[in-house]
Image (cartoon, grey):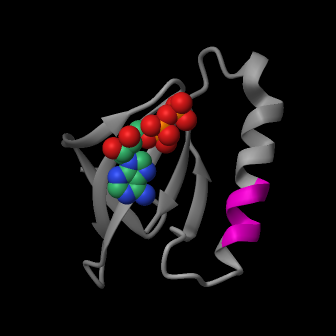
Amino acid sequence: MNIVGEYEYSSKDMLGHGAFAVVYKGRHRKKYMPVAIKCITKKGLIKTQNLLGKEIKILKELTELHHENVVALLDCKESQDCVNLVME
Ligand SMILES: Nc1ncnc2c1ncn2[C@@H]1O[C@H](COP(=O)(O)OP(=O)(O)OP(=O)(O)O)[C@@H](O)[C@H]1O
């Protein structure tokens, strides 16, 4: 299991991948609430660091709307190799 703050995921549980990241199905370590954990590798992030900052800012703003059609950003943690965004 890979630990991301209060959350965890197994590398076997991939949900999908995009241009910059791989997304895994994870869960809260105590409450077992299911989450999606988006892992953005730092390799190649230098060029896109501005974009990442913008994405995190937008996700935080959207989360404040508490809208049923908008996934909330639950946590954001940096590890040695990647930036992990924990989402609904
Ligand atoms: N919150 C989520 N819950 C469930 N699945 C998700 C979630 N976020 C992403 N995914 C899955 O992971 C895939 C990749 O998502 P990601 O956000 O990395 O890229 P994208 O939005 O598809 O494309 P791009 O990299 O161009 O933004 C999605 O297509 C979807 O299948």
- Residue at 44% of width from left, 70% of height from top? 6
Q: Tell me if I can see residue 39 in this picture.
A: no
State the residue at coordinates (75%, 57%).
58
Q: Position of residue 14 (x, y in %)?
A: 24, 40
Q: Nearer the viewer, residue 13 or 3?
A: 13
In this rendering, the count of numbered labels is 0
Where residue 21 sits in the image (x, y, percent)? 48, 32
Residue 20 relative to residue 59: left or right: left
Q: Nearer the viewer, residue 50 or 78?
A: 50
Q: Residue furthest left?
A: 12
Residue 84 screen position, x and y as percent: 53, 47
Residue 10's place in the image compared with 57, above or below, is above
Residue at 61%, 84% (x, y): give it.
66
- Work out whether 86 lies above or below 30: above
Q: Is residue 13 magenta?
A: no
Question: Compared to 39, does 56 lie above or below?
Answer: below
Q: Tell me if I can see residue 9 in this picture.
A: yes
Q: Which residues are magenta?
A: 57-62
**Quarter occupied by residue 46:** top right
On the rendered structure, is 14 left or right of 84? left
Ligand 1: image quarter: top left
In the foreground, 22 or 18: 18
